[in-house]
């Protein structure tokens, strides 16, 4: 028995020596007899026939350990259209077993490993910015195309130095030269400090893809800073909360079917605020629906910090991505329970916007705001360089005591505002839009109180000039008015107010006015009319000549925080009233005074019109 074992081991040893000797001889023969560099021209010619420009500047070399293959150095390539690049070194290998299969059937060439070092790629799609990828490295070993897992690692630099790396266990099934299925297990993708982990599976000739990805918590503001270093035209947001955008993470689950419905479900954690973004794709109808929902978003954290001129509107740009990138019909539906600002809160925010061919139609916008509701519909046309829009909106029960301090730095007016308006405009900035804004509307204010002046006091002071009895009443601050109604129109940055009607006590008020939107200034001409002998039960008595006739006032002011309101009778319109009153009081002597010649020209003009001098003095005394 021992003799048989010794003979068997001798056979095995002799066989192994023979195989090693044979392979060594083949390797030596191939290395000495075949100069692979002689095939450079043939390889480049074959590439051109396949639509690629290939130039091999370095040497070709055989590799035998650990696996036989070819090493290519310093090669440049181009697809003659949009992609071009180069590699420092590319090594293609096959297994020893597959090498025997190739010898038996040269058409059965299956790569066992690929290693790429020092790669560069520039992709220049039409009408888009080119993408440059540098320092590309890739390594895959023990490659199989029968669904068996094999490792894949890759890394590169993009966007001027952003580090990207991929690690995964990959499995591919190829039939008749086409990929039937592909899976990426234990997938890890790294972009600088952002890490994504998960898995992806594709089947049905890659027509169905499903998987999941989860990111670590990362600072979005740091990523934006890196992009701004590469693209100086991008301005960084300067937010009121320094910790804003520093704690962001994403979870995504997706199921994509190019021949049916697809779903992508994303959960975004934005500084502790959960935002769900779900995408539904109808491939057959080419429709994309995006549904955004959240409980609470503190918008004030993402507004520009005090004193900053930064424009943070770009933070909301992702909402426009579906409309900008999707070529078919698009719908974006947003539901947010509460949007918190510094001075107010928007509750129950809901909007539904449809888009097609760069035209957006807002079918609904509803919010609860300042104790009331806002409803709006509209249309935005972005097919030209200057977007155009139409907006129909209504306000119901807006509490002005809450609204004006928040949006206009004013607290002079209170009451419940209801309004309807139809507006049209165009432009790429707020100033451009205001300058061309046009439209019409109407408004009603229930229980209005205007704190800037007491209209009855102002009227009584003016009436005293016309012969009325001065009042000893201690006037309260402000004016309580009856329901106020008005029509308005907007044109070229101006709001024209007309048919303004209200009343207080026995005073009826109607008027018209102008609001300068850009300058935040307003001017209102109001006619007051007394319907009785007194302005109110506790007011002043009114001269008989002023009863049941209009006394005009002009009020002007600013919406700025330090803005003031000034109201006084219209000098030009009350001149006749005042002239008659003073004439009666003075017995006509003023107008019979002779003109006195004096050296001073100003004094001469004053003496020549004593009424003008007296009018000026009385007005200054009573209306300061």
Image (cartoon, rainbow, N blue to C red):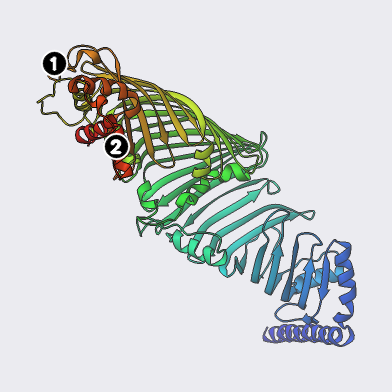
> How many C-alpha atoms fall within 10 Å of the one at disc 1: few (<14), some, or many (≥20)?
few
Identify the image quadrant of the C terminus: top left
Residue at the spot 27% in from the left edge and 36% down from the top edge? 596
Q: Is residue 130 above or below residue 253?
A: below
Question: In what element is the residue under mark 2?
Answer: helix
Q: CA distance from mark 1 to mark 2?
A: 42 Å
Q: Nearer the viewer, residue 560 or 525?
A: 525
> How many C-alpha atoms fall within 10 Å of the one at disc 2: few (<14), some, or many (≥20)?
some
- The residue under label 1 is 537
Q: Quadrant of residue 261?
A: top right
Residue 101 image point, x, y percent: 81, 68
- The residue under label 2 is 606
Residue at the spot 85% in from the left edge and 61% down from the top edge? 51
Q: Nearer the viewer, residue 357 or 212?
A: 357
Residue at the spot 48% in from the left edge and 43% down from the top edge? 277
Q: Is residue 9 left or right of residue 514?
A: right
Answer yes or no: is residue 261 visible. yes
């Amino acid at each position: 028995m021992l003799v048989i074992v010794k003979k068997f081991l001798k056979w095995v040893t002799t066989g192994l020596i023979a195989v090693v000797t044979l392979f060594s001889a083949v390797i030596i023969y191939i290395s000495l007899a075949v100069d692979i560099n002689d095939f450079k021209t043939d390889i480049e010619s074959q590439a051109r026939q396949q639509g690629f420009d290939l130039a091999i500047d370095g040497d070709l070399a055989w590799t035998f350990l650990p696996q036989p293959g070819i090493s290519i150095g310093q090669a440049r390539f181009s697809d003659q259209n949009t992609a071009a690049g180069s590699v420092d070194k590319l090594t293609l290998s096959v297994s020893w077993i597959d090498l025997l299969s190739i010898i038996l059937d040269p058409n059965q060439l299956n790569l066992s490993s690929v290693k790429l070092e020092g790669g560069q790629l520039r992709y220049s799609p039409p009408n888009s910015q080119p993408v440059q990828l540098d320092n590309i490295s890739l390594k895959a070993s023990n490659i199989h195309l029968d669904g068996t897992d094999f490792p894949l690692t890759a890394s590169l630099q993009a966007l001027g130095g952003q580090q990207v790396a991929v690690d995964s266990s990959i499995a591919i099934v190829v039939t008749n030269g086409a990929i039937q299925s592909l899976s990426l297990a234990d997938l890890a993708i790294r972009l600088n400090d952002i890490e994504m982990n998960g898995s992806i599976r594709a089947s049905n000739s890659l027509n169905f893809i499903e998987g999941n990805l989860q990111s670590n918590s990362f600072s979005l503001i740091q990523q934006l800073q890196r992009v701004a270093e590469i693209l100086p035209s991008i301005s960084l947001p300067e937010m009121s909360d320094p910790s804003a955008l520093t704690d962001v993470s994403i979870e995504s689950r997706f199921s994509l079917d190019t021949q049916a419905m697809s779903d992508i479900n994303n959960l975004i954690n934005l500084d502790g605020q959960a935002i769900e973004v779900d995408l539904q794709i109808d491939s057959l109808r080419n429709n994309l629906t995006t549904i955004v929902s959240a409980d609470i978003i503190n918008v004030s954290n993402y507004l520009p910090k005090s004193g900053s001129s930064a424009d943070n509107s770009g933070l909301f740009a992702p909402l426009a991505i579906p409309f900008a990138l999707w070529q078919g019909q698009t719908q974006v539906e947003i539901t947010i329970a509460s949007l918190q600002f510094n001075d107010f809160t928007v509750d129950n925010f809901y909007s539904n916007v449809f888009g097609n061919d760069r035209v957006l139609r807002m079918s609904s916008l509803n919010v609860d705001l300042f104790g009331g509701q806002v409803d709006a519909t509209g249309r935005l046309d972005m097919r030209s360089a200057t977007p155009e829009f139409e907006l129909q909106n209504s306000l119901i029960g807006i509490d002005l005591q809450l609204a004006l301090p928040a949006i206009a730095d004013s607290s002079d007016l209170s009451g419940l505002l209801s309004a309807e308006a139809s507006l049209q405009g165009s432009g790429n900035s707020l100033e451009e839009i205001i300058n061309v804004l046009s439209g019409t509307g109407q408004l009603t204010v229930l229980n209005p109180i205007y704190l800037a002046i007491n209209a009855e006091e102002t009227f009584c002071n003016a009436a005293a000039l016309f012969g009325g009895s001065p009042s000893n009443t201690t006037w309260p601050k402000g004016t309580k008015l009856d329901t106020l109604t008005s029509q308005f129109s907007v044109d070229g940055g101006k709001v024209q107010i007309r048919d303004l009607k209200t009343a207080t006590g026995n005073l009826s008020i109607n008027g018209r006015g102008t609001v300068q939107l850009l300058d935040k200034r307003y001017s209102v001409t109001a006619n007051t009319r007394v319907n009785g002998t007194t302005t109110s039960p506790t007011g002043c008595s009114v001269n008989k000549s002023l009863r049941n006739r209009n006394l005009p006032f002009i009020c002007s002011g600013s919406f700025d925080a330090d803005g003031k309101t000034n109201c006084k009778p219209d000098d030009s319109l009350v001149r006749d009233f005042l002239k008659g009153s003073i004439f009666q009081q003075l017995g006509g002597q003023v107008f019979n005074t002779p003109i006195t010649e004096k050296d001073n020209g100003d004094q001469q003009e004053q003496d020549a019109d004593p009424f003008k001098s007296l009018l000026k003095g009385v007005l200054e005394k009573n209306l300061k």
